[in-house]
Amino acid sequence: MKFFRPKSILHLILLGFFLVALPLIIGLVFATISVDRLVNQSQQTLLDSVFITQSSHALIEAVTAMERNARQYQVLGDRVLFDVYAENHTRFVETANSLDEPELAKSQNKRLEVLRHDANEVHAALSEYPYDAQEITAVLPLFSKLDQTAKLLLRDNQDLINRGVEEIQGKAGKVQRTLVFQAVALVPAALLLTGLFAVLITRPIKQVDQAIRRLGDGKFSDPAIVTGPRDLEQLGERLNWLRNRLLELEQDKTRFLQHISHELKTPLSNIREGAELMNEQVIGELNNPQQEIVDILRDNSLQLQKLIEDLLNFSILRARASQLSYDRVELKTVIENVLADHKVAMLSRNLDPQTSLQAINVIGDAEKLRILVDNLISNAIKYSPDGSPLRVLLSSRDSQAIIEVADCGPGIPVTEHERIFEAFFQGKPASKGHVRGTGLGLSIAREYARAHGGNITVVDSTRAGARLQVVLPLEQGS
């Protein structure tokens, strides 16, 4: 089954607005119709009640006038009085006939028929017999019955009004309950639709945002999956195209680093061997200026070798070719060996190594952990002022091994706490050293820490300088 997909985010928003407003519009239309019907019925009931009341009063007045004219005619025999009676009778008949239009109660219809019958009987007698006939005298008492019946009709109308009011109140209550039920049902439905379309609208935007963040973090292996309107899906396809291009560039960069590193390693080895031969005075004894030049050449070749090794390690990491060789590793021994390797560098700078090392073992790759610690300590030496202390701590906490390396250098700005672990990022230049670093040491250290299930972060410190902390699990399986 193929689901409907809007062509653009605008179409989806407009569709959402329409569907959210639709239940409310339906409820509003129903409420308007119901209230309008109730108002129309109330108006009609009121008009009918007023009309019936007025007509009932008119019937009573007509009956009274008819009785007066008939009795006067019966006494005086004046034909003019009969004509006046006949006019009042005509008015009576018209009023009675007008009561056929509104809907009357059964009792009112019966009383209206009785009124018509008795009035017609009296009128027939007055029209047929002489004014002094016994038949006229016999029907005149019917006027009292007519008056009483008309008054009863008026009373029944009051009862009809009361029943109409009660009926309207009942319908008003029913309409009110219906409107409340609609509000209880439609408002949550509108809110549910609002939440649904909020998810449908924000989900593809979040997917695009996550895809961009992954690209920014250098995670090119995960494809950008964007589901939603067609224009956002096309944006996801473009992000995938960009991801593939970046992945190709990253692979090209890695291959370039591998080739250039290997190409540099061979001539550098020759330079180092030549420097070592001259330093050992194999080709002859050196004077002091010559020995100084040889030392400079040897030291710089060592620094260049370190930089090339960093490039090689980094290219291996980026290519995912690095495999950990797990074994039990004594971190205290690793740190002590690294400090011993840097003893000459620390002596030349008159640095004071301050250590507090516990005997802690972890499961990991000894060589990778050595490189991790070496990069931290060499970085601290590079940024430490001459004659300053260099602190190296090893402790355990919550089943984790904690390695801290702190120097007294310029420190790391808060804005660079994460950036210093990015590849090729270089902070403030070191105060010493002929060769500027590649910006790969801390990046490699973080990769190795994460490969062991740990992490490396910059820790805020009240002292001057930078303080880096490595957290490693005490037990890490293969």
Image (cartoon, helix red, strand yellow):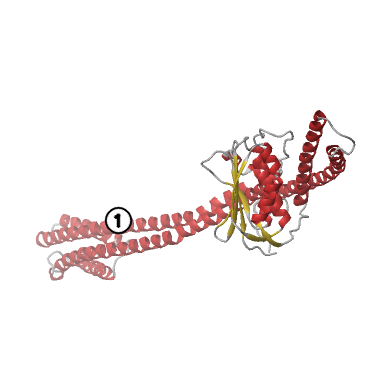
Q: In this rendering, is residue 107 above or below 334?
A: below
Residue 273 spot, x, y in % from top left: 86, 41
Identify residue type, mark 1. Leu
Residue 401 spot, x, y in % from top left: 60, 57
* The image quarter in which residue 166 lies: bottom left
Q: Residue under circle 1?
A: 47
Q: Nearer the viewer, residue 320 or 445?
A: 445
Residue 296 spot, x, y in % from top left: 78, 34
Residue at point 87% right, 41% down? 270
Q: Is residue 69 left or right of residue 41?
A: left
Q: Nearer the viewer, residue 459 or 327?
A: 327
Residue at point 61% right, 40% down? 416
Q: In this rendering, is residue 318 above or below 173?
A: above
Residue 46 spot, x, y in % from top left: 29, 57
Regarding mark 1 in the picture, which secondary structure is present there?
helix
The reply to whether residue 36 is in sight is yes
Q: Is residue 9 left or right of residue 136?
A: right
Dot 1 alpha-carbon crowd within 10 angstroms: few under 14, some 14 to 19, many 20 or more: few
User: Which quadrant does the N terminus fall into?
Assistant: bottom right
User: Which quadrant does the C terminus fall into?
Assistant: bottom right
Q: In this rendering, is residue 378 above or below 288?
A: below
